[in-house]
Image (cartoon, rainbow, N blue to C red):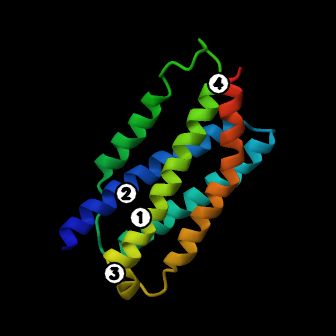
Amino acid sequence: MDRFLSIYLNDQLAMGIAWRELARRAQKANRATELGDTLSRVAAEIAEDVETFGDIMRRLRIRRNLAKGALTTLAERIGRLKPNGRVATYSPLSRFEELEVLIMGIEGKKQLWNTLDQLADLKTRLPDIDFRRLIDRASRQRALLEPHRAQAGVDAFQY
């Protein structure tokens, strides 16, 4: 069972790293705005979640698959090259898509914490990890980003 848990955790860690990098990039693209301030907070919390996740893996003695992390980081950077409706600048579509993908990642993270708590029964193996708090924090992150995502959608599609 730990073999499957190891694969699952490494897959989830790789995705967490990608969302962390996306949040940081979006924050930089929107600095000195209300959205940039929100993204700064969310990006910091996502980075904390990735650290928590890494700590869980260390405590379970699950080795990190460095290749998965590197490939995910590379894929996130290659994703920056996709067309956004502008040749060389940030566009309203870029903002919307970044927020949309971040929210998808946050929803996935909520599911991850629930899986580790309920299905993998890590609450028994790691009783000091408060999975409910992690799920609640992800819900707050989504709530912070949602109004910005909605406005970005209006800006992109009613431009």
- Three-letter residue code for mark 3: Asp
Residue 110: image location, x then y, percent: 49, 63
| Position above or below: 2 against 63 | below
Q: Which residue is mark 4?
A: 157
Per the rendering, the mark at residue 121 is: 3
Crowding at mark 4 (Cα within 10 Å: few <14, some 14-19, many 20+): few
Circles 4 and 1: CB atoms closer than 8 Å:
no
- Three-letter residue code for mark 4: Phe
| The N terminus lies in quadrant | bottom left
Q: Secondary structure at mark 2?
A: helix
Q: Which residue is mark 2?
A: 12
Q: Which residue is mark 1?
A: 112
- Mark-to-mark CA distance, 3 and 4: 44 Å
Q: Depth-wise, is mark 4 or mark 1 nearer the camera?
A: 4
Residue placed at 53% from the left, 55% from the top?
106
Circles 3 and 2: CB atoms closer than 8 Å:
no
Q: Depth-wise, is mark 3 or mark 4 nearer the camera?
A: 4
Q: Secondary structure at mark 3?
A: loop
| The C terminus lies in quadrant | top right
- 72 vs 137, nearest the viewer: 137
- Mark-to-mark CA distance, 1 and 3: 12 Å
Residue 85: image location, x then y, percent: 58, 16
Residue placed at 25% from the left, 60% from the top?
7
